[in-house]
Amino acid sequence: MSTGLEKRATRVEVSEDDLEALLGDRALGRDDHLNAPGFVIRPDDVQDVLTDLRDEAGFDHLSCLTAQEYSDRYESIYHLKKYADPTQEVSVVVPTTTDDPVSQSAEPVFRTADWHEREAFDLVGIDYEGHPDPRRILLPETWQGHPLSKGYDQEKPQIVTLSEHANPIQPDHHDEESDTMFLNIGPHHPATHGVLHVKTVLDGETVVDIDPDIGYLHRCEEQMCQQGTYRHQIMPYPDRWDYVSAGLLNEWAYARAAEDLANIEVPEYAQIIRTMGAELCRIASHMLALGTFALDVYGDFTAVFQYAFRDREVVQDILEDLTGQRLMFNYFRLGGVAWDLPEPRDEFIAKTRDFLDELPAKVDEYNDMITSNEIFQVRCHNTGILEPEVAKQYGCTGPVARGSGIDYDLRRDDPYGYYENLEWDVVTQDGCDNYARVLVRMQEVEESAKIIEQCLDLLEDWPEDDREVQANVPRTLKPDADTEVYRAVEAAKGELGIYIRSDGTDKPGRFKIRSPCFSNLQALEVMSEGEYIPDLVASLGSLDIVLGEVDR
Amino acid sequence: MSSNNPRQSIHDSTAPSTDTRDSRIGEGPDDRFNSKLREAFGASPFILTKFDKFMNWVRGNSMFMLQFGIACCSIEMIHTYAIKHDLDRFGAGVPRASPRQADVMIVPGTIVSKFGPRMKRVYDQMPEPKFVVGMGSCTISGGPFQEGYNVVKGAEEIIPIDIHVPGCPPRPEALIYGVAKLQERIRNGESSPVVVKPYELEQFGDLPKDELVQKLASEIDEDDLVMRYNWADSP
């Protein structure tokens, strides 16, 4: 564990001049975003430029790939960051022509680009040359057209197949020595945490190859956000991305991006409420992760699972008092929150404090039942190994990255809200296995409790005439045309980023969601191949994916 | 204390108020039927009812749910099963992972094009008689995602639904109410008629040969099951 301020002292700055010098002639022009300098490059320079940025300038985190169509061109934007310091960002903008949208694939440089580029092809229609697996990812294989491109007709009929009996012995995995078996896990399966479909090839009990098939919950979140107005119509949707009670954390991602875009200042008092609410959500989310993981690993629908849900109920009660909703809070507003703490304040604060007071005893209980349980340790220790270098290649963030010893937490490294002024620690574990990831989540619950406690102290003593919950924000927001911003927050599962391009109207021109689960799930193949199939289930559980966010 | 007049209701403790225990220990016949239930039925331990009615009563009071999570609503559904709300109290809360062991399917979430055929298949695998509770706005109309290019406008486009529970998501209490209503309907022998739905699983070869079918003819085998979505006709 390290404390809040240690890491920022070691930052190495790369100035824009250095970047310009590094890219040289390859930079055709500049297309700066609010958060980062942007360089326009040719579509066949992608690998070259990204390799240089990674190796020479240290941008080792491909956070997101945004694809979009303008009236005269397609554009892929690679949002790069550093794991050591995520405030240093650079955008690489790759325009391609409308009649021949072919761009070089970044997959050889950043492994995570694999799925991101498939998604860009699927929804927008850009082809990536040299991509190892250029298939659709979210929509069915037989889908016609690219729904987020211009001129897509939503009314057209579509045909979707139900290929129920995929060839049980795949010829490409079959050899003389070992007979392999093909196994479908999901999309309706208790261990997949939703509607994930994992195509698995087994050799005996050993996993030879897996191919996660996603898109069974692709409910057009980006389209919905592009149809909503900034001020009120977008905020309800973030709750439904990561629906495991992480609502406020998601809302914050949108709030942060939109507030930066429209240059809105949030009052300090509202920031404290936000911070407190967000951490309550994190506790609720980690509790569910813990309960379902125990369910996956030792089929325990009784003790651990019910204990975790008992504690979630308490958190949900508190959040309901605060926001008026159990699950879909819609509590943040641009420039603050919807309303102040519920009256009577003392009662709310006392209730929350009661929960915090009881938490240490409950955590002890979990430690007795879960982490110190020998069977559990045997199941989780040294399974689902994810080395830190591999995790970075796959763009893993959140507890998954921190379980692999990557000291990366946006709450500290790219501060927002009130986190900077509070005393808390970033939890990391070096185990790189399923056990480490569980430990990280359990300890993060304690850290969140610390944060909430400090927020409560502040809220309790806050002068009554200075309780400003919302800044003065115009009724209709129309940011300047072609302003672009990419902002991320530390959601329960990792880095949740939002890219918004405004087109001068009161609705976003392009709204792109960078989901932590999408990137984390991609790492499942390295974690489970060569291991036993029960360990695949454990690894999947320890990634703590939520399909609403993977598919969006 | 048994009598020949059936009683309408039983109050207080459910322990037998007769001397059964004494009679078991003592001499004479073992009067095991001498219970509160016996009191309720009167002297003769026979119930005369229609078999159908009896079966409906049994069905309504022992429902096996399908363990079926789709989206946000499934979190509230888990809460309904779990501690505090405990749906099991109502004789309806044993989640079964296999559709072949389930008689009620709670559809908790948004149905998208890729999942539609799968849900239909899972529904088909459940043994008759089967019932469906549609949970949340998405299963009614597509909910907040209704305008999405990929979203089926309500689960009723694909499978018959007995009870709709509105909400986004409905609170556990609401779901319990919905399930209780379903039990009531089952006891009364009602269920939604199964009719042809807008979206059915069909063999690709049976589809009318329109432009789209001809385009896909090289990719899809004649015998493959497909679902054809007519987005323009959806509400």
Image: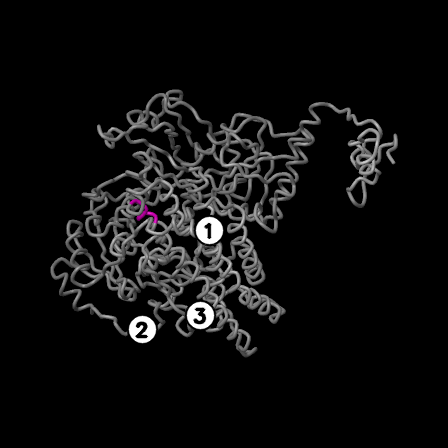
Query: Pointer 2 and pointer 1: residues touching (CB < 8 Å)?
Result: no
Q: Amino acid at mark 2?
A: Glu
SS assignment for the magenta stretch, majority: helix
Give the letter of the chain under mark 1: A
Query: Looking at the picture, how far across and down is residue B110, in whole percent?
Result: 48, 42
Q: Earlier in the sequence, mark 2 or mark 1?
A: 2
The residue that label 1 is drawn on is A240
Q: Are marks 1 and 3 on the same chain?
A: yes
Query: Looking at the picture, how far across and down is residue A382, in whole percent?
Result: 33, 51
The residue that label 2 is drawn on is A6
* Residue A524 is one of the magenta-drawn residues: yes
Q: Earlier in the sequence, mark 3 or mark 2?
A: 2
Give the letter of the chain under mark 3: A
Q: Residues within 10 Å of mark 1 (few under 14, many from 20)?
A: many
The residue that label 3 is drawn on is A266
Q: Earlier in the sequence, mark 1 or mark 3?
A: 1
Instruction: Please give the name of the residue rendered at 36% of the width and 56% of the height, measured from the top-left corner.
Output: A436
Which of label 1 and label 3 is nearer to you? 1
Query: In whole angstroms, how far apart are the C-alphas of marks 1 and 3?
Result: 24 Å
Q: Which residues are magenta?
A: A521-525
Q: Above or below — where is B172 with respect to A363?
A: above
* Residue A71 is one of the magenta-drawn residues: no
Give the letter of the chain under mark 2: A
